[in-house]
Image: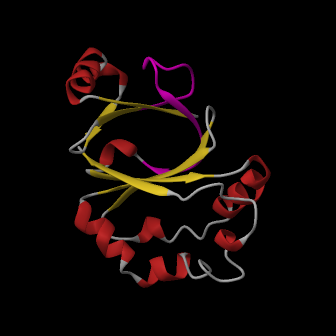
């Protein structure tokens, strides 16, 4: 399965979504830009889109009203360890109130992985960040056991982008 992500101006995204209404695309936006997502087994209908291989998927991306893209640059030598960490994740986020979907996305055109979570609304995401489950899922962060302390895995800092429907 692949996920295609087109990013650009709001008006172009709206037109693209209208042109592909039957294709199952979803449109998200923030103040600066819009994104159109298309998840499919074969080729995309979106031109100039970023392409990701879906490594892990739970839920339906169309169900969420608030999307969080955790963008994580990973070196070539760190890819195997990084992917292993997410293949063996505990899956606690799926049990949280307001959770709609998660996608662990391997980049096919860059070094930046994306962990995409979709939520009912922004408050559901904030509640997850304050939950015990979040604390357990991120317990090793910043410790000697944490992947973030391993050398030669992350070439630069990660960054988060958020969008609403």
Q: Image point 75% across, 55% down: which residue?
A: 78
- Is the residue 110 above or below the residue 86 in the image? above
In this orientation, which residue lies closer to the viewer: 145 or 85?
A: 145
Residue placed farthest to the right in the image?
A: 77
User: Which quadrant holds residue 30?
Assistant: top left
- Is the residue 113 above or below the residue 159 in the image? above
Q: Image point 41% across, 56% down: which residue?
A: 160
- x then y, percent, for residue 112: 58, 45
Region in magenta: 38-59
- State yes or no: residue 112 in magenta: no
- x then y, percent, for residue 60: 40, 46
- State yes or no: residue 43 in magenta: yes
In this orientation, which residue lies closer to the viewer: 42 or 137?
A: 137
Q: Image point 46% across, 68% down: which residue?
A: 93
Quarter of the image where the N terminus is located: top right
In this orientation, which residue lies closer to the viewer: 13 or 98?
A: 13
Q: Image point 30% across, 71% down: which residue?
A: 126
- x then y, percent, for residue 138: 54, 76
Q: How is the image coloured?
A: secondary structure
- x then y, percent, for residue 8: 32, 29
- Is the residue 30 above or below the residue 118 in the image? above
């Amino acid at each position: 399965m692949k996920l295609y992500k087109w990013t650009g101006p709001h008006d172009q995204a709206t037109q693209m979504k209208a042109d592909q209404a039957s294709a199952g695309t979803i449109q998200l936006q923030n103040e600066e830009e819009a994104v159109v997502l298309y998840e499919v087994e074969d080729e995309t209908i979106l031109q100039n889109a970023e392409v990701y291989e879906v490594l892990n998927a739970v839920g339906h991306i169309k169900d969420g009203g608030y999307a969080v893209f955790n963008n994580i640059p990973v070196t070539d030598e760190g890819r195997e360890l990084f992917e292993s960490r997410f293949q063996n994740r505990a899956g606690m986020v799926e049990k949280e109130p307001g959770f709609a979907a998660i996608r662990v996305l391997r980049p096919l055109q860059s070094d930046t992985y994306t962990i995409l979570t979709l939520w009912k609304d922004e408050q559901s995401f904030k509640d997850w960040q304050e939950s015990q489950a979040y604390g357990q899922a991120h317990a090793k962060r910043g410790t000697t056991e944490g992947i973030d302390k391993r050398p030669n895995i992350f070439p630069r800092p990660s960054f988060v982008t958020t969008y609403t429907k």
